[in-house]
Amino acid sequence: MTRVLFAAAEAAPFYKTGGLGDVSMALPRALQAEGIETRVVIPYYPHQMPTEYQQQLVPVTHFTVQVGEHAMYCGIKTLTVAHVQYYLIDNLDYFGREGLYGYWDDGERFAFFQMAVCEMMERIDYIPDILQLNDWHTAFIPVLLAEKYYWIEAYRDIKTVLTIHNLQFQGVYDPIILDSLFRIGTETYTEAGVAFYDQVNWLKGGINFADAVNTVSPTYAQEIQTPAFGERLDGVLRANRYKLSGILNGIDMQLYDPATDLALTANYSAKDLKPKRQNKRALQRRLGLPVKNVPVLAVVSRLTKQKGIDLLLDALNPFLQQQDVQLIVLGTGDPALERALRTYQSAYPQKVVAAIQFDTQLAQQIYAASDIFLMPSAFEPCGLSQMMAMHYGTLPIVHAVGGLRDTVIPYNRYTGQGTGFSFDDYQPAVLRKIMVLAVTLYRQHPLVWRQLQHQAMTCDFGWEHSAQQYRATYQKLMR
């Protein structure tokens, strides 16, 4: 049986700040279901971990990790959730904080974590066939295996797979860290290694040293090889394209199921869409909007430019003046964008609700109650929200990039095919035009709309497909 150790900086259900947390829960479970023994290693953040899981933790071992001149305590705890065994790396100095990231010493924190992962494998006697790494927090591990731990016989056959969830975050530090944190020489400090504009780039090192690299959608894997999306690493990615692929993320089809979702006022399915309206009325009442059957457009997102919120704001004014619609926005993020959304709510109190918060239950009610889901991201490695919206029969409007292009089939008025709407030209007027098109179709062609809803709801975005592609990647490396 293939053995995988899945290393990440966060994993639901313990803690998550974004999509990585969801993937770190769902993918190991799906791999396990495919017959691949998968264990997960993450940092232990005691302030974030729910008490129910804290109480299940069992100590495994402890040792010290040499971080530069300092021998740092490293405790290993374990627990099993949904048939997946988790190892948690414990050091209160590094991980006993209020948040997961965003500290001045993140470089040192995740240098410790990566060395702890490498040194843990031998001590717990779990030597994987595949080390599945995720984003910059774990991207330096292939470099460490080649340069620091090369003498450990048991590690020589380990293959490394690096998954890039978002190329924007790279782990870029002063070259001094090669010695001051990792205690390795400067042999890797080359263009073909880890050097990056007079700095050290962990993600670049991972791309160059890993046995395989993938992103979280086929389109994003192509886009990041271009200057427009490559975040100054497009040349490195083109040089490594022989080992680069795109594997689409999935969603938990059981968890996000309108037929069984307990957060909803009324459950419904692709076969019986009528109760969806009850959810709309209930949400309108809850949020203080007029209870009437107008098109409801929704955003559930981090409020950032990457998510296209600035583009949406530029498109909204004439649209709201001319159309009898309602808009619900849920999320937090850039304070300037939050303020702008609140201004729209003040200007259009009968039409706009800006819920500047994060509330999972409310998010699921919005997916169920809305008619149109807006996701005009500037770039999108994969995106999960558009898949959730479709599963709830809420048709997405997306910018045709990355995973949005791979998951949403644009409506074709001649054939009736489609699961949503998309636009290519990233301009407010273009977004506004597609919003008007969608709202008009909703009003004037209810049978066509229902057909699109049915097509969207019956798409299979389950994790099994992704897990099968990861398994194929692993098998290829182990031949």
Image (cartoon, rainbow, N blue to C red):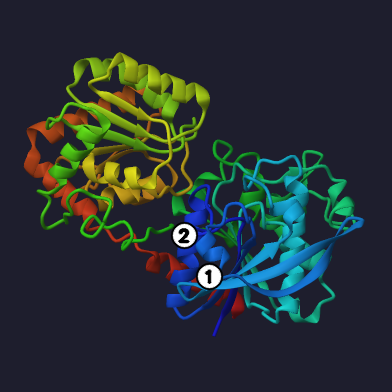
Which quadrant: the C terminus?
bottom right
Is residue 52 in sight in this rendering?
Answer: yes
Whether residue 158 sits left or right of residue 36 in the image: it is right
Disc 2 designates what residue? 247
Residue 217: give x, y in percent of width and height: 46, 53
> Which element type, helix, strand or loop, lies under badge 2?
loop
**Separation of marks 1 and 2 at Cα, in angstroms:** 10 Å
Provide the secondary structure element on which disc 1 rests.
helix
Q: What amino acid is at disc 2?
A: Ile
In the displayed orientation, state which residue is furthest to the right.
69
Residue positioned most to the bottom:
1
Front in this rendered view, residue 317 or 145:
317
Q: Are marks 1 and 2 in contact (CB under 8 Å)?
A: yes
Where residue 319 sits: x, y (%)? 26, 20
Tell me what residue is drawn at x 25 percent, y 37 percent. 372
The numbered mark, 1 or 2, whose residue comes first in the sequence reads: 2
Task: Identify which residue, 115 or 52, lies in the foreground.
Answer: 52
Q: Position of residue 355 (x, y in %)?
A: 37, 31
Residue at point 37%, 50% (across, down): 406
> What residue is shown at x 76% (from left), y 44% (from top)?
105
Q: Which residue is mark 1?
A: 473
Q: Residues within 10 Å of mark 2 (few under 14, many from 20)?
A: many
The image shows residue 234 at horizontal and vertical percentages of 62, 44
Q: Is residue 427 visible?
A: no
Q: Residue 25, labelled with which disc?
A: none
104 w.r.t. 274: above or below: above
Residue at 75%, 39% (x, y): give it: 104
Query: As drawn, is 284 to the left or to the right of 54?
Result: left
Which image quadrant: the N terminus? bottom right
Q: Is residue 90 above or below residue 294?
A: below
Residue type (three-letter) at the residue carrying disc 1: Thr
